[in-house]
């Protein structure tokens, strides 16, 4: 039966592309359902520049992942499509799609990703009020153009400030988690800015720096020693504008315990990773649980890796919480492999029935 040869993969970011490629490589059919009209997820849709840690342009790295599934005889793709209803159980699922089609699958992989934190929820830091206050994704898009300019008037900035933990580790706005990748992405972004605009000084304002593992040397120390990024341990109170039109970063230098008011030309919010805004809908359609913050809940992770609260449905990547691209790809492979194992088990049970 077709369902015993098919895995439904929901989402076509790095995790979903990895899961689908794994299923196809193992000789089974993968059906990708992607709500956007392009494949590649956040790195493509949000216009990321160079990826951490490889330094490769996102469009090239993710482009290879897309090419691996697009045109693969074992992979079919539904773009601009959502799953609206799921019937059946593990080994015997029927998914109803928004394009009117149905998919019969033995197992399912959810690779539904995350939503970038909306800096409008941190209004005191100037986003949405001042044109030269940007998010990291917007700054990466600027890097992709090959030049660094103030959006307000096109001048080359003398000073750029990157504010860490915008939408992360902030109980006042309901974000109690660390978004894991912001520190490393920001140190990398600081180096990219300096490469394109050597005369620009880059400042990173931080509570703590968490460039974990091997990233400490490659990004944290390199950005300081080779690119002269200036790190300031601080509590930022607000971003305002001075009479001469420059931005003012106000707060407290928490190392020396003194107030600071620093003029800047561009201020960048290092935005965190929120649960996918559609997770309540996804949880209802697929019958899976959400953890307390709103990410997709996982099963017992040591013996049921990538499992969800529903048998036969697996999850990978940032759908379960903030995650790096590399780990999302690895989890996609894991989820795809587990989903294929379910197909073999279901087929064996059908033969013996």
Image (cartoon, rainbow, N blue to C red):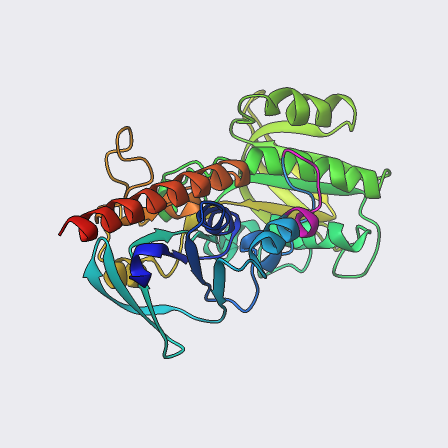
Q: Range of the magenta residues?
A: 53-61
Q: Which of the pair 286/295 is nearer the observer?
A: 286
Q: Which of the pair 221/256 is nearer the observer?
A: 221
Asked if residue 218 is positioned above or below residue 15 in the image, the reply reads above
Asked if residue 37 is positioned above or below residue 212 in the image, the reply reads below
Residue found at the far bottom of this picture: 100
Asked if the magenta segment contains residue 331, the reply would be no
Q: Which residue: 68% across, 50% down?
A: 140
The quadrant of the image that shows the N terminus is: bottom left
Residue found at the far left of this picture: 353
Residue found at the far right of this picture: 199
Q: Which residue: 51% across, 30% down?
A: 207
Q: Which residue: 46% across, 63% down?
A: 34
Within the image, what quadrant is residue 95 found in? Answer: bottom left
**Looking at the picture, how far across and down is residue 282, in whole percent?**
31, 60
Asked if the magenta segment contains residue 57, the reply would be yes
**Looking at the picture, how far across and down is residue 134, in whole percent?**
63, 53
- Lateral position of residue 143 relative to residue 180, left or right: right
- Lateral position of residue 207 relative to residue 316, left or right: right
Residue 163 showing in the rendered view: yes
Within the image, what quadrant is residue 291 found in? Answer: top left
- Lateral position of residue 33 relative to residue 257, left or right: left
Q: Which of the pair 272/16 is nearer the observer?
A: 16
């Amino acid at each position: 039966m077709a369902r015993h040869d098919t895995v439904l993969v929901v989402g076509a970011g790095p995790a979903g592309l990895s899961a689908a490629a794994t299923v196809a490589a193992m000789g089974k059919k993968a059906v990708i359902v992607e709500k956007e009209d392009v494949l590649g997820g956040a790195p493509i849709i949000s216009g990321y520049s160079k990826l951490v840690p490889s330094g490769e342009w996102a469009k090239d790295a993710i482009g290879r992942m897309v090419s691996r599934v697009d045109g693969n005889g074992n992979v079919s793709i539904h773009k601009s499509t959502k799953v609206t209803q799921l019937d059946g159980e593990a080994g015997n699922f029927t998914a109803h799609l928004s394009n009117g089609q149905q998919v019969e699958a033995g197992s399912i992989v959810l690779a539904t990703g995350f939503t970038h934190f909306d800096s409008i929820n941190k209004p005191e830091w100037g986003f949405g009020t001042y044109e030269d206050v940007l998010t990291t994704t917007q700054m990466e898009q600027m890097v992709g153009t090959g030049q660094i300019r103030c959006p307000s008037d096109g001048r080359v900035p003398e000073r750029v400030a990157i504010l860490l933990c915008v939408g992360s580790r902030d109980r006042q706005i309901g974000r109690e988690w660390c978004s894991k990748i912001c520190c490393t992405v920001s140190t990398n972004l600081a180096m990219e800015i300096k490469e394109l605009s050597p005369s620009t000084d880059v400042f990173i304002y931080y509570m703590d720096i968490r460039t974990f593992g091997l990233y400490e040397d490659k990004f944290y120390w390199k950005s300081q020693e080779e690119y002269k990024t200036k790190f300031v341990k601080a509590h930022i109170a607000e971003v305002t504008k001075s009479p001469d039109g420059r931005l003012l970063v106000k707060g407290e230098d928490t190392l020396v315990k003194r107030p600071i008011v620093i003029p800047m030309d561009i201020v960048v919010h290092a935005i965190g990773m929120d649960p996918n805004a559609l997770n309540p809908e996804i949880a209802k359609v697929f019958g899976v649980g959400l953890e307390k913050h709103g990410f997709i809940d996982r099963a017992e992770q040591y013996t049921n890796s990538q499992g969800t609260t529903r048998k036969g449905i697996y999850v990978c990547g940032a759908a379960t919480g903030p995650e790096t691209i590399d780990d999302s790809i690895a989890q996609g492979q894991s989820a795809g492999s587990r989903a294929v194992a379910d197909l073999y088990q279901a087929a064996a049970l059908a033969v013996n029935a």
